[in-house]
Image (cartoon, rainbow, N blue to C red):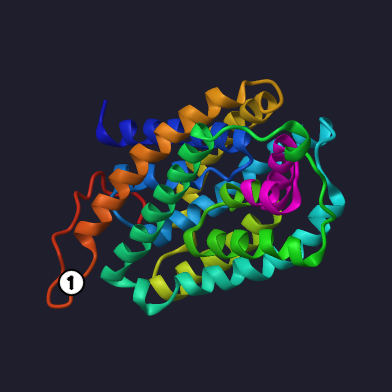
Amino acid sequence: MNDLVVLILLLVLTGFLAGFTGGLLGIGGSIIMIPAMTELLGPDQHLYQAAAMIVNFFVVVPSAVQHYRAGAIDARLIGRLLPVALVCVIIGVTSSEHSWFHGVGEARLRLLFGLFLLFIAAYELYRLVRRSAPAAARDAEVQPSWRFAAAVAVPTGLVAGLLGVGGGILAVPLQRRFLGVPIRQAIANSATLIIATSLVGAAVKNYALVAYHARTLSTSLMLAGVLIPTAIVGASIGSSLTHRLHRRVVQVAFFVLLLLVAVRLTWSALRDVPRPVESGPTADAGFALPFR
């Protein structure tokens, strides 16, 4: 079996795992896809973010359908979150195209992504060890005022655009914190929100990929095309388990995965971040992309 076949099979598996995780947790799946592509193909953060944003759309659509059938989506809340999140995701993508993140500075974007994953892993650990609040306190409803909606939508959109993630990794806990939304409904709302933010983010990021990085659109489309089929299957399975699987099992598995990925990605990026005088050594390039 040659290297290209192995690479494609590993990307297919990556798509399934990203879709399953995204469907189960109401996130896009970029936290799986981007580190995996970096490991398999070598550093190319802007390309991977552009491809992952495309895949995120296909991950969350089957998830949102499952949540809609379960009656878990709050349309009124989505109406408050969506406009703010869309504006912020455009701002986030634009920020990722700053010259500081171009060329060898791409490692800085990878470093931000790795640090973001470390932060999320720390938060997941906190959730695992803290004592759960009483059910009444957890599920207390807060009216979705614009002030509270902005507290959810602004960081969700900015981080989604800047790092190429779906944003659900923030949208779910922020809905819990500021709006008192029950966990399964927060996951359903997040999946629905990502349908729009991933579509807009993918359009802007892929335009930037062509305009500012001298890449063809077919590069990210082909990469996304390998990931999408199994991502859809994984998302359908994951979202169907959201309302049945024991949450603590999911939390432990998610924490372990996040920690391993975050440490690996952050360490690799730290080696590649440009130094004031000279650039550091480059990371292992892994497989070469066959469709540049």
Left or right of 159, for residue 86: right
Place of residue 191 in the rendered image (x, y in percent of width and height, measured from the top left): 69, 44
Residue 152 sits above or below residue 36 on the image: below
Q: Nearer the viewer, residue 112 or 37?
A: 112
Residue at figure coordinates x 39%, y 30% from the top left = 9
The part of the image, by quadrant, that contains residue 198 is bottom right
In the figure, residue 11 lies in which quadrant? top left
The kind of residue on which mark 1 rests is Arg
Magenta run includes residue 182: yes
Q: Is residue 83 rendered to the left or right of residue 226? A: right
Visible residue check, residue 190? yes
User: Badge 1 is on which residue?
Assistant: 275
Please report the residue visible at 47 percent of the width from the left and 47 percent of the height from the top. 120
Query: What secondary structure prevails in the magenta region?
Result: helix
Q: Secondary structure at mark 1?
A: loop
Q: Residue 193: x and y, percent?
A: 71, 52
Q: Quadrant of the N terminus?
A: top left
Which is more toward the observer, 180 or 98?
180
Q: Quadrant of residue 63?
A: top right
Looking at the rendering, the stretch of residues picked out in magenta corresponds to 173-194
Query: Does residue 269 belong to the magenta stretch?
Result: no
Q: Nearer the viewer, residue 16 or 138?
A: 138
Report x, y in % for residue 130.
53, 35
Q: Residue at x 47, y 75 (%)?
A: 211
Foreground of the two, 152 or 276:
152
Quadrant occupied by the C terminus: bottom left
Q: Residues within 10 Å of mark 1 (few under 14, many from 20)?
A: few
For residue 146, above or below residue 68: below
